[in-house]
């Protein structure tokens, strides 16, 4: 998932404060790991791997990323405590002996581009060909239930299974994308896939449309071999397709420019120079995954998550009240944007749509209770009217040329 993934969300975890006992000598670490993986698959984790709690290999890259200020307003990433924990998972749980990394698939935004379409670098053309240009775009991981509400119960069940198999309580701590861990680094070291140039964790068969989770365990499990091959090769499709040019050469993203950050994490005004690059994305962005050839064969997502883009007629969205927003998006990731952020994104998408027919609702939005919405509505109105004036001027010039 492209959760800017710079951990766009609050920390979410659970800890069991139980004393570790030695597990049954009747079962080897390798056998136990295989049983855990079979159980994990049954719980919907299509990929599972084990790594050590040793410091992640790309921690220095993360520090450099912070030093460059690429994290924007996500100050929680740069605190001393957060850095210490990302640098060394044992800072989270000193008795940790193994980390179980899990991947759950979510629905790909269909259809996947054909090989010829993948070479498009013009997103407007690409989306027109895919027929996904109407309405607003929501990143596909957010189409349905919030994974923060779905995955914890599965991890709890997995931990229970591990304790049953080990025949002893096992101290543990789990995270669902949101913990102070460099989760893609750990996933690569656990053999799940490689970190692509688009910064997503990619598996050769499953692609990158999945959510990562981790369980820290006070239990020795045999580590899996790391995934060492880089299958990106000479491909640069994601870099070329990114509308804001925020994919960096060291396989990180300048979050300040990424649409996922701008439409979800950023709580204030979207910088002027980036607004027209957002297109019709109103919550997150899937472009750098949509164009990735490794997602061509991505299978259907876990049925617990949605498989339909919830974006509706954007002009209707503008009349949504706070109560209606909370009711409609309760239990989905979109709620995270809150009404003010969601409507800010909607008016930017309408401005980028350039449709004169949307001017009346934008003029109403200029009186919205939220100053943030009002300011962006004004920008959208000016964008549409100036584009309309340019078109009219072009028509006049063409008529003159014909005369
Ligand atoms: Fe961010 Fe660019 Fe990927 Fe969109 S295409 S999610 S803007 S990195
Ligand atoms: Fe790698 Fe190409 Fe996919 Fe980007 S689009 S992540 S370069 S394979």
Image: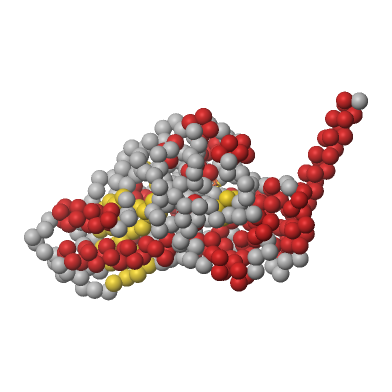
Q: Residue at x 49, y 44 (%)?
A: 110
Q: Judge by depth and name the residue closer to the eye, 222 or 359.
A: 359
Q: Is residue 314 above or below residue 207?
A: below
Q: Which residue lies furthest to the top in this view?
A: 402
Point out residue 185 in the picture as x, y percentages from the top left corner.
Answer: 37, 50
| Residue 93 visible in rendering | no
Quadrant position of the C terminus in the picture: top right
Residue 246 is situated, as x and y percent measured from the top left of the image, at 55, 45
Relative to residue 131, is residue 397 drawn left or right?
A: right
- Residue at point 43% right, 38% down? 296
Q: Is residue 268 left or right of residue 286?
A: right
Q: In which quarter of the image is residue 102?
A: bottom left
Residue located 46% across and 56% down the image: 306
Identify which residue is drawn at 59% across, 59% down: 266
User: Visible in this render: residue 49?
Assistant: yes
Q: In this view, does 212 lie above or below 228?
A: below
Residue 161, given in percent of the width and then of the height, sits at 22, 64
Horizontal side of residue 397 vs 364, given as left or right: right
Q: Position of residue 321 (x, y in %)?
A: 65, 69
């Amino acid at each position: 998932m492209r959760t800017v993934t710079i951990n766009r969300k609050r920390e979410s975890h659970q800890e069991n404060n139980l004393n570790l006992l030695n597990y049954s000598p009747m079962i080897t670490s390798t056998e136990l790991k295989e049983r855990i993986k079979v159980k994990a698959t049954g719980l919907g984790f299509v990929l599972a791997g084990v790594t050590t709690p040793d410091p992640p290999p790309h921690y220095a890259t993360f520090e450099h990323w912070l030093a460059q200020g690429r994290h924007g307003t996500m100050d929680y990433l740069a605190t001393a405590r957060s850095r210490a924990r990302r640098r060394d998972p044992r800072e989270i749980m000193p008795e940790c002996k193994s980390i179980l990394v899990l991947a759950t698939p979510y629905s790909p935004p269909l259809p996947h581009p054909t090989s010829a379409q993948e070479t498009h670098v013009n997103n407007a053309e690409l989306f027109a060909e895919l027929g996904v240009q109407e309405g607003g775009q929501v990143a596909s991981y957010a189409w349905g239930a919030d994974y923060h509400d779905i995955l914890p119960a599965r991890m709890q069940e997995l931990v229970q299974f591990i304790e049953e198999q080990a025949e002893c309580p096992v101290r543990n701590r789990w995270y669902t994308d949101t913990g102070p861990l460099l989760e893609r680094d750990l996933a690569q070291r656990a053999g799940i896939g490689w970190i692509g140039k688009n910064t997503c964790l990619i598996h050769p068969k499953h692609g990158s449309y999945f959510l990562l989770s981790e369980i820290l365990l006070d239990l020795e499990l045999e580590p899996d071999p790391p995934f060492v091959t880089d299958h990106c090769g000479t491909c640069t499709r994601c870099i070329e397709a990114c509308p804001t040019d925020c994919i960096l050469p060291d396989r990180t993203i300048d979050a300040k420019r990424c649409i996922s950050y701008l439409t979800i994490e950023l709580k204030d005004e979207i910088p002027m120079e980036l607004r027209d690059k957002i297109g019709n994305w109103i919550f997150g962005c899937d472009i750098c995954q949509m164009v990735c050839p490794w997602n061509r064969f991505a299978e259907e997502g876990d049925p617990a998550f949605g498989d339909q883009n919830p974006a509706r007629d954007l002009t209707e969205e503008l009349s949504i009240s706070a109560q209606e927003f909370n009711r409609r998006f309760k239990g989905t990731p979109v709620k995270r944007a809150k009404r003010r952020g969601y409507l800010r994104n909607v008016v930017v998408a309408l401005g980028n749509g350039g449709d004169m027919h949307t001017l009346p609702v934008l003029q109403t939005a200029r009186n919205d209770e939220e100053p943030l919405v009002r300011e962006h509505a004004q920008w959208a109105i000016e964008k549409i009217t100036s584009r309309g004036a340019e078109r009219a001027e072009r028509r006049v010039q063409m008529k003159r040329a014909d005369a």
